[in-house]
Image (tube, helix red, strand yellow):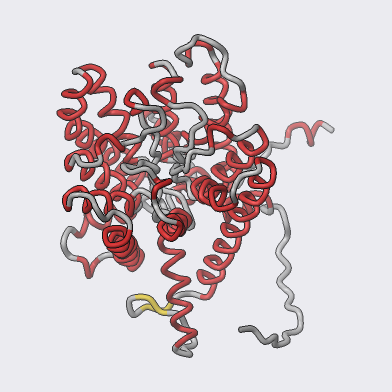
């Protein structure tokens, strides 16, 4: 008995990441329940506080209460801290405090940090984490300063400065939570649809936050020498560019006709950038056609890039699946990307992630549609937004019941932590069976 009592429970990196995110969400929810967190000075129901904490830590942006009008300044500060922690990653933030305290980081901690930022190797992981923290604060500071003239002019110096900081962090962390409710509840950035400065700065912050920490390092180290970049960085940059340009062209010619050219260009590009996975919007999404909403759903499911502040299946997953499809079409034995062969295990992981995301997104929507008696299309949009940690909404989230909110909470957590991370955390103690069963062919297609 004494030996069993003295045994220490050892968590693997995947379990540490999952429990880390869950712990921060729970603490955030308890703080947001306090009367000081709401403008009315009343206790916020636990399910509402949990939803808000989850959407902040998972940098999603779906809300059940308008952030500007419901939460006090204290509550907004708590939400901003949760967004920052969620965007950088719980493990990265915790490791930074350990380093600042002058303590050494052990092998297990380094392994966890490697998984948290999706680094290819453990070597240099502490230096990479330091680079991530410094770059994050520098970019967010520049973004806040750039937006300050507009917000300070519209809301006064102090409120404008706070809004600049809040929206810069929210955009960079791909959260999409805003304080624009003072101009109309749940209005997001629709009042700035024709403002080039706000549109461009927010889009740049979203893109920079969404391409991934390793891609930043590649750009910082190799500058304009693109040939020296990792293949992953090249795939991310190329896929990101295509996923912005192609939907923007469709939106420009098919959705935003009848508005001035300048505003039309800004609206098209903004609504192409934000679904992956920021959640801000400058136009009323309910006015977009069914085809346009379907494109946005696909973009939300794809999301950003590995090791970034964004969620979703990731651009690399999409690129690998497309490369594998083209290899089948061309009857090639191996999938290829940028003249490099892709490992079969990577393709299997990508296919698994696709199946998990599609299944959860669709099943969640079916349940919510049935419970709430809402159109399936609107529910699919909300569940795609949740699992892709986007935050775009057709306006039904604030009206959902507790069960439907809980479904969205689960999808947001799944989307931020990652499906494979959750599975590896749950099945870490299962012994691998190295034996192979007899093989038999099955016809498909």
Determine the image quadrant of residue 162: top left
In this view, the residue farthest toward the bottom is 331
**Along the line of sight, the residue nearer the viewer: 340 or 209:** 209
Which image quadrant: the N terminus?
A: top right
In the image: residue 361, left or right of residue 179: right
Residue drawn at x 57%, y 41% is 16
Determine the image quadrant of residue 68: top left
- Count of numbered circles on the image: 0
Residue drawn at x 58%, y 56% is 420
**Along the line of sight, the residue nearer the viewer: 275 or 106:** 275
Residue drawn at x 31%, y 56% is 215
Residue 149 position in % (x across, y down): 15, 28
Which image quadrant: the C terminus?
A: bottom right
Vertical side of 96 occupied by 163: above or below: above
Can residue 114 be seen in the rendering of this structure?
yes
Can residue 237 be seen in the rendering of this structure?
no
Residue 41 position in % (x across, y down): 50, 9
**Along the line of sight, the residue nearer the viewer: 284 or 62:** 284
**Along the line of sight, the residue nearer the viewer: 172 or 176:** 176
Residue 111 position in % (x across, y down): 49, 49
Vertical side of 83 occupied by 385: above or below: below
In this view, the residue farthest toward the top is 41
In this view, the residue farthest toward the right is 1
Residue drawn at x 25%, y 29% is 164
């Amino acid at each position: 008995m004494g030996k069993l009592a003295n045994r220490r429970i050892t968590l693997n990196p995947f379990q540490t990441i999952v429990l880390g995110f869950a712990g921060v969400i729970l603490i955030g929810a308890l703080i947001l329940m306090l009367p000081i967190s709401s403008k009315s000075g009343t206790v916020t129901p636990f399910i509402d506080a949990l939803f808000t904490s989850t959407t902040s830590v998972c940098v999603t942006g779906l809300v059940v209460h308008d952030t500007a009008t419901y939460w006090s300044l204290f509550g907004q500060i708590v939400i901003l801290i949760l967004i920052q922690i969620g965007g950088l990653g719980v493990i990265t933030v915790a490791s930074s405090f350990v380093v600042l305290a002058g303590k050494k980081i052990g092998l297990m901690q380094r392994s966890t940090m490697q998984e948290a930022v999706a680094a290819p190797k453990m070597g240099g992981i502490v230096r990479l984490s330091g680079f991530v923290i410094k770059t994050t604060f520098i970019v967010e500071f520049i973004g806040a300063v750039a937006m300050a003239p507009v917000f300070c002019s519209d809301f006064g110096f102090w409120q404008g400065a706070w809004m600049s900081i809040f929206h810069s962090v929210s955009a960079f962390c791909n959260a999409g939570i805003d304080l624009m409710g003072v101009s109309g509840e749940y209005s997001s950035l629709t009042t700035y649809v024709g403002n080039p400065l706000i549109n461009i700065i927010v889009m740049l912050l979203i893109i920079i936050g969404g391409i991934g920490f390793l891609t930043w390092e590649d750009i910082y180290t190799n500058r304009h020498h693109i040939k020296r970049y990792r293949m992953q960085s090249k795939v991310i940059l190329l896929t990101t560019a295509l996923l912005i340009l192609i939907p923007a062209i469709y939106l420009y010619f098919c959705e935003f006709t009848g508005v001035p050219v300048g505003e039309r260009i800004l609206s098209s590009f903004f609504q192409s950038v934000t679904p992956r996975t920021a959640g801000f919007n400058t136009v009323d999404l309910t006015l977009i056609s069914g085809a346009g909403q379907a494109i946005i759903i696909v973009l939300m499911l794809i999301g950003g890039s590995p090791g970034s502040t964004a969620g979703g299946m990731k651009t690399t997953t999409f690129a690998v699946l497309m490369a594998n499809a083209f290899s089948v079409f061309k009857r090639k034995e191996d999938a290829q990307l940028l003249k490099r062969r892709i490992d079969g295990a990577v393709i299997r992981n990508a296919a698994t992630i696709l199946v998990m995301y599609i299944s959860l997104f669709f099943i969640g929507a079916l349940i919510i549609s049935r419970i709430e008696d809402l159109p399936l299309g609107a529910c699919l949009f909300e569940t795609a937004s949740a699992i892709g940690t986007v935050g775009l909404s057709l306006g039904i989230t604030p009206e959902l019941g507790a069960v439907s909110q809980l479904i969205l909470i689960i999808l947001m957590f799944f989307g931020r932590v990652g499906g494979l991370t959750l599975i590896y955390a749950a099945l870490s103690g299962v012994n691998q069976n190295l034996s192979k069963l007899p093989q038999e062919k099955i016809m498909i297609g």
